Image (tube, grey):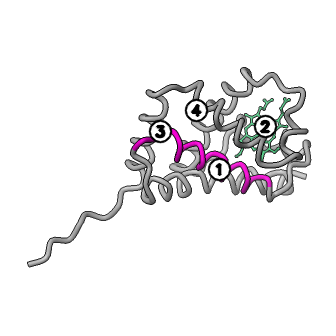
């Protein structure tokens, strides 16, 4: 009799990966992400040319947690709406969100020692609702 493996639990795969990364060093994670993101395009580099990056790391940390909560309950809140409106006002194009996601995945791949295709898919699935919200909310609200 062949044994069937349990269905993949993407919530758990994501949560375990996130916990490993945060335990290994929160600052390292967000700093590495912005290094990749800024290196990914001159447009991104220009957008952050005058930004206080230490402050930016904390803001991304907070917004990432809000995106996780959005992924599980699909409820926007005033924080997410404010961040999405700010990005719409900054004229952030849709394709830059793809770069944002790929830079984040590159960071996870480098820093999570248990990274594999399942962990990658768990990150993609978890980030997707928040990314689509960020992409579309600007037009929705205008
Ligand atoms: C889902 C993806 C993203 C998240 C969660 C996110 C998160 C944030 C947050 C929380 C802030 C601070 C908002 C505030 O001032 O209160 C911010 C600012 C900013 N973001 Fe994003 N962001 C995302 C995607 C992007 C993309 C794709 C770009 C493209 C270049 C971008 C460029 C910027 C810029 C230029 C600022 C302002 C920096 C400054 O104040 O100097 N973001 N972002």
Judging by the rendered image, the residue that carries numbered circle 3 is 18
Residue 29's disc number = 4
Query: How far is the residue under mark 3 from the one under mark 4?
Result: 10 Å
Judging by the rendered image, the residue that carries numbered circle 2 is 82
Q: Main secondary structure of the magenta part?
A: helix
- Asked if residue 34 is positioned above or below residue 115 in the image, the reply reads above
Q: Does the Cβ of the disc 1 residue fall within 8 Å of ligand 1?
A: yes
Q: Earlier in the sequence, mark 1 or mark 4?
A: 4
Residue 130's disc number = 1
Mark closer to the observer (4, 2): 4
Q: Is residue 111 magenta?
A: yes
Instruction: Assess disc 3: are there few (<14), some (14-19) or many (≥20) residues with their C-alpha within 10 Å of its C-alpha.
Output: some
Q: Quadrant of ligand 1?
A: top right
Q: Earlier in the sequence, mark 4 or mark 2?
A: 4
Residue at the image point whose x is 73% and y is 21% from the top: 55
Q: Position of residue 72 (x, y in %)?
A: 51, 49
Q: Position of residue 95 (x, y in %)?
A: 80, 59
Circles 1 and 2: CB distance less than 8 Å? no
Q: Is residue 5 magenta?
A: no
Residue at the image point whose x is 68% and y is 52% from the top: 131
Q: Position of residue 122 (x, y in %)?
A: 47, 55
Query: How far is the residue under mark 4 from the one under mark 2?
Result: 24 Å
Query: How far is the residue under mark 1 from the one under mark 3?
Result: 16 Å
Q: Position of residue 53 (x, y in %)?
A: 76, 25
Which image quarter: residue 68?
top right
Question: Magenta residues, as a range?
Answer: 96-113
């Amino acid at each position: 009799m062949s044994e069937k493996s349990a269905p993949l639990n993407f919530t758990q795969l994501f949560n375990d990966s996130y916990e490993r990364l945060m335990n290994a060093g929160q600052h390292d994670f967000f700093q590495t992400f912005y290094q990749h993101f800024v290196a990914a395009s001159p447009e991104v580099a220009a957008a952050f040319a005058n930004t206080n990056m230490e402050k930016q790391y904390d803001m991304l940390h907070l917004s990432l947690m809000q995106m996780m909560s959005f992924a599980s309950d699909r409820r926007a809140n005033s924080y997410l709406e404010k961040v999405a409106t700010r990005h719409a006002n900054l004229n952030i194009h849709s394709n830059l969100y793809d770069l944002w996601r790929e830079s984040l995945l590159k960071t996870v791949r480098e820093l999570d020692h248990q990274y594999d295709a399942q962990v990658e898919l768990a990150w993609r699935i978890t980030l997707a609702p928040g990314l689509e919200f960020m992409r579309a909310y600007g037009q929705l609200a205008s």
